[in-house]
């Protein structure tokens, strides 16, 4: 019998557990359908899960259908338990991604899709809740294709020609087969699914068992069972404890066989298997032997950890999704922390995303967690397991640090009868890449054994940054040189030299503080979009309107975790319960308030005795300390970067680190966006704080080049500015037309001063049949967009079509639009900067006028154009001559 290990994933409330129940019921595994709201679901076995109605811990069920034995792994859908889900991905053959037909593709759904792509797992999609009136199959499949992948194909179609046409577009081999025979074999479709060239999509209602049977048969029909080698291999993905407190190691065998009393090792620990269990729901079956493709739980292992690889399997990388909140655990009076920490370590084994740490300086237990729901779960676990009531403080953000340039860090450790020197090249890495360690040091300079020891020391510690003491990330650290002493060097010497080299390099580098960002999806009434976008801008986030249906709008974007943590409550308040906010962790990006964070944390890298920045040298038989900025004046090994600079003189290829030239600010922006922030997506790019002058005027041309003069255009995003200016926003709540007129009057006055073409653009895209309308309002132009065209679209198109002919400035506070028009070479004015420009220009005009007039009285003749004044003077002169 062939075996498949399939995981089921979804955003919370998409119906994942209900679909699992339906599959188990149709296979005959269970006789009665359980329900989440009835607290009798087959896989929600934990009391906490049944109480809250959500899946917290991944569990498995086994059923057979059409000659296939399927091990179904149910994973948590809540964002706070994403790491639990991610660990399960490591052992899957296929994944089922459940999407709510009522809600569509959510922010967390996209996160799951990216993870499935990263782990290269084939995916079947089930669009649930299609029995609800708000669902539209055609619109849903189009959105899934657009937001996930165009190769998501509906497999429930009746018209075979349409079905084969779509399949043929996904794969060249299927295209050739279809053109030759007019048909595509099932086996070939299965291969395409396995290779992630096609993603089968089914529709139905799990609660009513509509479409579930067709989905299960389609799953078995198109999924191909993997082959397993005779050589033993296994991947550990989870640690739990049973009701008797026995430690269980959950793993999938990827090759060979495993028997009771076999000895397992990962190269570090070696232990004997006492029992092999195969779980399905709460129950398990003890067996004496299992083979490849089996998912089992073992007793007898005490050192195993999630991610360990056994036999032919390598250890897994750390999960991409990680805790971003840090809380202090407050113990009850009389509870000894030294007694409590070992107990908390047990929970940490089972839930590695809950990272427990003891802060020696503060004398407190700290826990890094994913979110506030996880706090409640952790409190419940501690109470049920150890009968201890713990509390948590208000929590704080987990920051990280990286660097923005290439530096060489030098560490030297030479007290009497000790010696080691280490040179490390520190380079910025791609955002989200973590830390990469490697060696490019010649064995003629430093032996292989010392090099391996240095790399071990790099990996064994969480190195602190120098801004806030936060851990470093997104860097490449390369061992480029070093020196040992034949007689005096010991292993611990290189540990000290390595740590000091990292810190010395960080002190020299341009450090960047990073903070976690949420990707969000906000559903709310359309009339409240302006309020929401202003809120998000105030939270230093970016947003855009994704869709508008039946007076409900969907905003998508990103914002710092710290500013958005409690926004859900505010949304519920001002939308009167109609708004919904979905957040998922996007990753780390440059901190929006670095100086404030640094002042609040108050970290002093020079006083951190546990992480010294200087080095120890020896003279006249005594060691002495050298500060970090003087280390390179004392080092014994030639600088790697200096050597590369010297080589440049004889070989042009060595210009990477030494060539300097003068570049413009725009070139700096482009370089940063193509390197350090290249994978952040279109919406989030590096943006240096620009002065008001830089935002409105082009830089001077290079010497010797004739500066080209172009007409100036100022494009104003009308509604964006209205909702960003408090006085106009307040007026708009009473009468939008009055707010428009007031804005236009402001701009009309400003045009007389700035002397450029001003175009105010307003959305009219929801007016059925509306054509683009251009109206002259005094000395400026007013544009109402056509149906299905937003103001953003109009401004972006105008900028693209006219950037070569005009100097264009765009006034908006929409982050995405700013990025796009910036990419077209336009200047930018935020709503706040435009307001300051207008007020400043008006004040300047009045000041100049009063100085020219010499008195406070106003005369009409002083306000007339020069030509009119001359005509009036000539007329007066003629009258006088008469």
Image: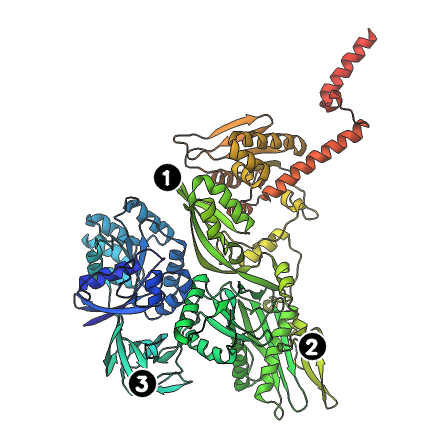
328 relative position to 847: left or right? left
Residue at horizontal 56 percent and vertical 36 percent from the top: 730
Residue annotated with mark 2: 631
Seen from the viewer's position, the closer of residues 638 and 533 is 533
10 Å crowding of disc 2: few (<14), some (14-19), many (20+): many
Q: Nearer the viewer, mark 2 or mark 3?
A: 3
Give whichever of discs 1 and 2 has the lower sequence position: 1
40 relative to 410, above or below: above
Q: State the residue position of label 3.
A: 273
Kindly give the residue lying farthest to the top in the view shown: 882
Q: Tell me what residue is drawn at x 69 percent, y 38 percent.
A: 840
Residue 416, image quadrant: bottom right
- Distance CA(mark 3)–CA(mark 1): 60 Å
SS under mark 1: loop
Q: Is residue 117 above or below residue 464?
A: above
* 613 and 372: which is toward the camera: 372
Residue beneath disc 1? 550
Report helix, strand or loop for mark 3.
Answer: loop
Q: Nearer the viewer, residue 803 or 594?
A: 594
Q: Earlier in the sequence, mark 2 or mark 3?
A: 3
Q: Are marks 3 and 1 in contact (CB under 8 Å)?
A: no
Q: Tell me the CA gap for discs 1 and 2.
A: 67 Å
Lower sequence index among marks 3 and 1 = 3
Determine the secondary structure under disc 2. Answer: helix
């Amino acid at each position: 019998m062939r075996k498949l290990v399939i995981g089921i994933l979804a955003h919370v409330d998409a119906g994942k557990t209900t679909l699992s129940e339906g599959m188990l019921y149709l296979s005959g595994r269970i006789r009665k359908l359980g329900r989440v709201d009835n607290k009798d679901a087959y896989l929600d076995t934990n009391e906490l899960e049944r109480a809250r109605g959500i899946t917290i811990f991944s569990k498995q069920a086994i059923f057979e259908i059409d000659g296939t034995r399927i091990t179904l792994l149910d994973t948590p859908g809540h964002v706070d338990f994403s790491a639990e889900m991610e660990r399960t991905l490591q052992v899957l053959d296929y994944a089922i991604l459940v999407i709510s037909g009522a809600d569509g593709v959510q922010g967390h759904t996209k996160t799951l899709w990216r993870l499935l792509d990263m782990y290269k797992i084939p995916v079947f999609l089930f669009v649930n809740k299609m029995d609800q009136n708000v669902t539209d199959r055609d619109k849903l499949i189009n959105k899934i294709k657009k937001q996930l992948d165009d190769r998501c194909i509906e497999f429930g179609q009746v018209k075979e020609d349409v079905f084969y046409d779509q399949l043929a577009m996904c794969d060249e081999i299927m295209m050739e087969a279809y053109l030759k025979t007019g048909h595509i074999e099932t086996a070939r479709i299965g291969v395409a699914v396995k290779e992630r060239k096609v993603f089968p999509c089914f529709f139905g209602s799990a609660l009513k068992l509509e479409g579930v049977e067709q989905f299960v048969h389609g799953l078995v029909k198109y999924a191909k069972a993997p082959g397993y080698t005779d050589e033993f291999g296994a991947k550990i993905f989870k640690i739990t404890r049973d009701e008797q407190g026995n430690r269980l190691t959950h793993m999938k065998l990827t090759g060979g066989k495993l028997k009771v009393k076999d000895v397992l090792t990962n190269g570090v620990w070696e232990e004997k298997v006492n029992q092999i269990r195969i779980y399905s729901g709460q129950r398990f079956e003890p067996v004496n032997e299992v083979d490849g493709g089996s998912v089992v739980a073992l007793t007898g292992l005490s050192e195993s950890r999630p991610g360990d690889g056994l036999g032919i399997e390598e250890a897994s990388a750390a999960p991409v999704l990680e805790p971003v909140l840090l809380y202090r655990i407050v113990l009850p009076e009389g509870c000894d922390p030294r007694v409590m920490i070992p107990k908390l370590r047990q929970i940490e084994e089972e839930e590695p995303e809950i990272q427990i740490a003891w802060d020696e300086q503060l004398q407190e237990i700290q826990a890094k967690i994913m979110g506030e729901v996880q706090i409640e779960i952790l409190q419940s676990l501690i109470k049920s397991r150890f009968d201890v009531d713990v509390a948590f403080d208000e929590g704080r953000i987990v920051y990280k640090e990286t660097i923005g340039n290439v530096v060489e860090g030098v560490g030297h450790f030479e007290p009497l009868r000790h010696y080691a020197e280490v040179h490390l090249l520190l380079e910025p890495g791609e955002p989200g890449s973590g830390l990469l360690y490697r060696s490019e040091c010649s064995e003629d300079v430093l032996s292989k054994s010392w090099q391996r020891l240095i790399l071990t020391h790099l990996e064994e510690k969480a190195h602190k940054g120098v801004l806030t003491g936060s851990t470093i990330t997104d860097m490449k650290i390369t061992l480029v040189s070093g020196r040992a002493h034949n007689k005096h060097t010991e292993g611990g010497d290189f540990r000290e030299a390595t740590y000091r080299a990292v810190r010395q390099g960080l002190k020299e580098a341009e450090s960047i503080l990073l903070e976690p960002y949420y990707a969000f999806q906000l559903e709310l009434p359309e009339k409240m979009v302006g309020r929401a976008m202003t809120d998000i801008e105030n939270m230093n986030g970016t947003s855009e309107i994704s869709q508008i249906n039946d007076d409900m709008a969907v905003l998508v974007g990103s914002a710092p975790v710290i500013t958005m943590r409690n926004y859900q409550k505010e949304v519920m308040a001002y939308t009167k319960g109609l708004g919904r906010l979905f957040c998922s962790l996007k990753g780390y990006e440059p901190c929006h308030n670095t100086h404030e964070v640094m002042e609040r944390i108050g970290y002093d890298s020079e006083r951190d005795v546990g992480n010294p920045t200087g080095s120890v040298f020896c003279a006249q038989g005594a060691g002495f300390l050298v500060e970090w900025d003087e280390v390179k004046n004392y080092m014994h090994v030639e600088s790697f970067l200096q050597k590369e600079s010297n080589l440049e003189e004889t070989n042009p290829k060595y210009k990477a680190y030494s060539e300097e030239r003068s570049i413009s600010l725009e070139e700096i922006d482009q370089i940063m966006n193509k390197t350090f922030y290249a994978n952040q997506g279109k919406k989030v790019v590096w943006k240096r704080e620009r002065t008001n002058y830089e935002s409105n005027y082009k830089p001077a041309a290079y010497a010797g080049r004739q500066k080209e003069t172009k007409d100036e255009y100022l494009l104003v995003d009308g509604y964006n500015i209205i909702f960003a200016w408090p006085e106009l926003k307040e007026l708009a709540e009473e009468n939008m037309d009055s707010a428009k007129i007031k804005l236009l009057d402001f701009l009309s006055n400003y045009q007389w001063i700035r002397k450029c073409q001003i175009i105010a653009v307003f959305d009219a895209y929801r007016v059925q049949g509306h054509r683009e309308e251009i109206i002259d309002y005094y000395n400026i132009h007013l544009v109402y967009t056509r149906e299905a065209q937003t103001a953003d679209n109009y401004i972006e198109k105008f900028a693209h079509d006219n950037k070569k002919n005009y100097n264009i400035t765009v006034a908006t506070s929409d982050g995405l639009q700013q990025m796009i028009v910036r990419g077209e070479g336009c200047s930018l004015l935020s709503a706040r900067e435009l307001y300051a420009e207008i007020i400043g220009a008006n004040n300047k005009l009045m000041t100049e006028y009063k100085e020219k007039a010499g008195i406070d009285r106003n005369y009409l003749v002083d306000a007339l154009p020069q030509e009119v004044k001359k005509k009036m003077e000539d007329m007066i002169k003629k009258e006088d001559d008469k």
